[in-house]
Image: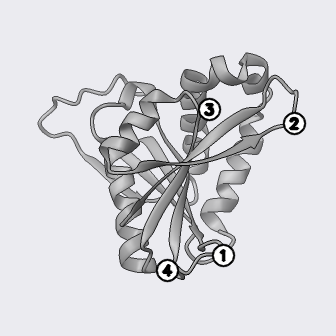
Amino acid sequence: MPGPLNPLTPTSDVSVRPAVPGDEQDVARVQLTAWRESLTETLGEAVLDGIDPTQLAAQWQRAISAPPGRGYRVLVAMHGPRLVGFASVAPVTAPADSDDDTPGGEILALEVLPEARRVGHGSRLLAAVVDLLRDEDGAGSVQTWVLVGDVVREQFLGSAGLDDMGAERRLGSEGDPREVTERLWAAAI
């Protein structure tokens, strides 16, 4: 594994690009590493230890190589030749009772390796997602779900112009100690 990132290197090559076949192992590695950093207290080590890295990589391989439809994308953040983050996005439609028929997009995942945070990778991923949604899909909004208590992610999204919309959803079985609550964050783009 390459050494630690040095954001002060003047020749630092940082970018965001579409994920390509072969990225799935690194995307799965970033996801599991980021989740261990931020979700161990919420979900517990046993739950995270129960995630099969091979199966997770296979799911990312399908998402990258054969997305389920138009508007589904996986983008990756690069620091030189090293994949350090990713974002996954899907189209969303307005609720049936809404007068707004403008398409939108949902960020399904946005993760950056802990050692690569706070040097702009997350912001570049978010900007690339918004650009794609607006320019290629004609989307008028972006949304994402955030675990209640993930203050760092809330601060990041808030600084990027997204707002807590007040909507909540619960994931998991009622009474299960692993049940979590997420809040919807969104912005017009």
Measured in 3D between alpha carbons, the distance from the residue under mark 3 to the one under mark 2, in whole angstroms, is 22 Å
Q: Nearer the viewer, residue 7 or 177?
A: 177
Q: Amino acid at mark 2?
A: Ser
| Residue 7 in picture, x, y percent from top left | 22, 30
| Element class at badge 4 | loop
Question: Could you tell me how far apart the alpha carbons at marks 4 and 1 are, in whole angstroms?
Answer: 13 Å
Q: Earlier in the sequence, mark 4 or mark 1?
A: 1
Please name whichever residue, 84 or 143, is drawn nearer the observer in this view of the structure. Answer: 143
Residue receiving disc 3 = 32
Whole-Å distance between the Cαs marked 2 and 1? 28 Å
Q: Please name the amino acid that badge 1 sits on.
A: Asp
Residue 108 visible in the picture? yes
Question: Considering only order in the chain, which callout, 1 or 2, is on the residue closer to the N terminus?
Answer: 1
Q: Going from the N terminus, do you reach mark 3 or mark 2 first?
A: 3
- In front of the other: label 2 or label 1? 1
The residue identified by callout 1 is: 97
- Residue 173 — which label? 2
Please give left or right for residue 128 compared with residue 38 in the image.
left
Task: Look at discs 3 and 4 and give the one toward the viewer.
Answer: 4
Estimate how packed mark 1 is, as few (under 14), some (14 to 19) or many (20 or more) residues with alpha carbons within 10 Å: few
How far separated are the C-alphas under marks 3 and 4? Answer: 34 Å
Badge 3 amino acid: Leu
Q: What residue did someone put label 4 on? A: 102
Q: Position of residue 147 (x, y in %)?
A: 60, 35
Q: Are marks 3 and 2 in contact (CB under 8 Å)?
A: no
Q: Amino acid at mark 4?
A: Thr
Q: Is residue 114 above or below residue 161?
A: above
**Sequence-first tag of 3 and 4:** 3
